[in-house]
Image: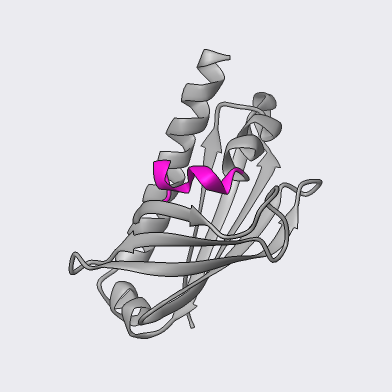
Amino acid sequence: MHSATDTIEIEATPEQTWRVLSNLRRLPEWYVPAQHIKILTDGPVREEWQFVLAVKTLSGLVLDALGTVKEFNPQAHAITWRGQAMGIAGDSRWQVVPAGNGGARINHTFQGQGWLMFLSQKLGRNRLTVRKRLENLKRLVEQEKSVQ
């Protein structure tokens, strides 16, 4: 099992941050390397909610990854989903916690296995991808906050 963990401070409340993070329909807006999403489960996001995320690999191939929400805890502002595609299976875990001055901090861990995950880890891409996801999410949350 390979993993990478990172955190980022957000200039928005935990509730504002959670609202964007937990809306999985918006993953292609910030979740690297998502291209587009197809929702498989009707209704709101919850445990066992499923989707297919088209993801672009390092080689440029676009794979369909089946995603299943394993944990959805609005009170703790925590969500984990498992993605599976050819060559990779991994868990993407997120938690929003209060930070100083009314802001929020997002903790993100991505851990997985398979030959694509092994390659990503060896090339140092896993750590960079985790960081890029956090930066993209931060930018999106802060943009939405400034519009409200």
Residue 32 in view, yes or no: no
Specify start and end residues of the magenta stretch as a single range: 23-32
* Colour style of the rendered protein structure: one colour
Quarter of the image where the C terminus is located: top right
- The percent position of residue 8, horizontal first and vertical second, equals 51, 43
Q: Residue at x 76, y 47 (%)?
A: 74
Question: How many marks on residues?
Answer: 0
Name which residue lies at 32% across and 78% down.
116
For this rendering, which residue is in front, 143 or 85?
A: 85
Residue visible at 69% across and 43% down? 97
In the image: residue 124, left or right of residue 71: left
Queried whether the magenta region covers residue 11, the answer comes back as no
In this image, 41 relative to 34: left or right?
A: right
Q: Main secondary structure of the magenta part?
A: helix
| Residue 89 visible to an observer of this rendering | yes
Q: Which residue is at the far right?
A: 75
* Residue at (59% x, 43% y) in the render: 23
Please say if 58 is above or below 39.
Answer: below
Residue 63: % across, % down: 32, 69
The spot of residue 76 in percent (x, y) is 78, 49
Q: Is residue 24 magenta?
A: yes
x and y, in percent, of residue 38 in the image: 47, 55
- Where 25 sits versus 16, above or below? below
Outermost residue, left direction?
Answer: 59
Q: Is residue 144 above or below residue 122?
A: above
Picture quarter containing residue 64?
A: bottom left
Closer to the camera in the image, 36 or 135: 36
